[in-house]
Amino acid sequence: MARVRVCVNRLRPALNRAVAEFEQAGFDACGLSVLDVRPIDVSLHPAITELDRYQHVIVTSPEAANQFTQAVLARWPQWPLGLTVWCVGAATAAAIPDEAGVIRTAKHPGSRALIADLQAALEPSARCVVATAEGAGRQFECLQPQLTWPLDRLELFAVIPGEEVDMQSCLQQPYWIHGSANLLRACCDYAATHHVSLAGVTHCVTSDDAEALLPPGWRYYRIAAPQPEYVRLALEGEPCVKA
């Protein structure tokens, strides 16, 4: 059986791992990254220096998990006790070490399912911090009305433009998998700047925001998460066409 050819659009630090994941799952995968990561120095941030005053850490992406783990290990000889780390998906949870305490993953991938789990589990007195990218993770502010204490934020990294990429060669892959709406937006902007048309490929997107970015006439699949099992499931059906 021929291997399905895909292009995986990710942040630069996550790209090799994501491509390998698709290759191991039986896809013919190449990687595309037009965005990179600039870590923010959080060594003196209260959410790191006083991590033991929190009961819950909400981690919004695999890269946030990587940066959070590095920051904690640089500050603490061992993880503070009593933490529950809430992750938006399996890839995020995989980046948190086992010694971090209780690690919980949303029943279904994405922030919407995780918010529902949190709303059911959090006590009003819970102390919570959202570990995320600069300017991201705002959807979790809907938890604030049920909490006595402020829902704190820990911005761990900024997303910045990456290096030049050969986007034309990626057009040989008929399916493009975008890890987020921000990655899709950056990909489309880069293509427009470099006079590359993406209308001939089929896009796999993960959210309403990403779907809204697609121009009329583009083909797409809606997937639960940018992982091989969800892409394979989506490809069993016919793609949608953006109205």
Image: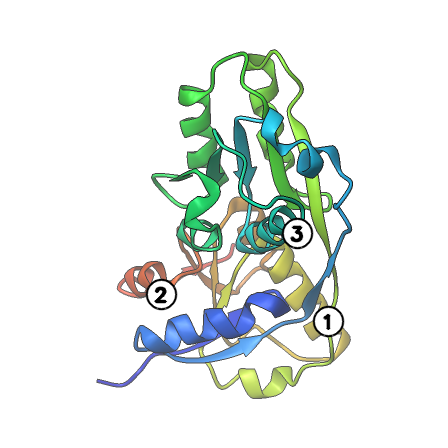
Residue 195 at x, y percent in the picture: 72, 80
Residue 154 at x, y percent in the picture: 69, 39
Q: Which residue is mark 1?
A: 162
Helix, strand, or loop for circle 1? loop
Mark nearer the N terminus (3 vs 1) = 3
Q: CA distance from mark 2 to mark 1?
A: 25 Å
Q: CA distance from mark 3 to mark 1?
A: 26 Å
Three-letter code for the amino acid on which mark 1 is drawn: Gly
Q: Residue at x 53, y 54 (%)?
A: 62
Helix, strand, or loop for circle 3? helix
Q: Residue at x 65, y 49 (%)?
A: 71
Q: Residue at x 58, y 24 (%)?
A: 142
Helix, strand, or loop for circle 2? helix
26 is higher (above) or lower (below) than 69: below
Q: Give the residue furthest to the front.
A: 77
Q: Which residue is mark 3?
A: 74
How dense is the environment of label 3, judged by Cα within 10 Å: few (below 14), some, or many (20 and up)?
Answer: few
Q: Is residue 186 visible?
A: yes
Circle nearer the viewer, 2 or 3: 3
Question: Residue 38 vs residue 33: left or right?
Answer: right
Q: Residue at x 58, y 75 (%)?
A: 32
Residue 81 at x, y percent in the picture: 49, 32
184 is higher (above) or lower (below) than 41: below
Q: Which residue is mark 2?
A: 228
How dense is the environment of label 2, judged by Cα within 10 Å: few (below 14), some, or many (20 and up)?
Answer: some
Q: CA distance from mark 2 to mark 3?
A: 33 Å
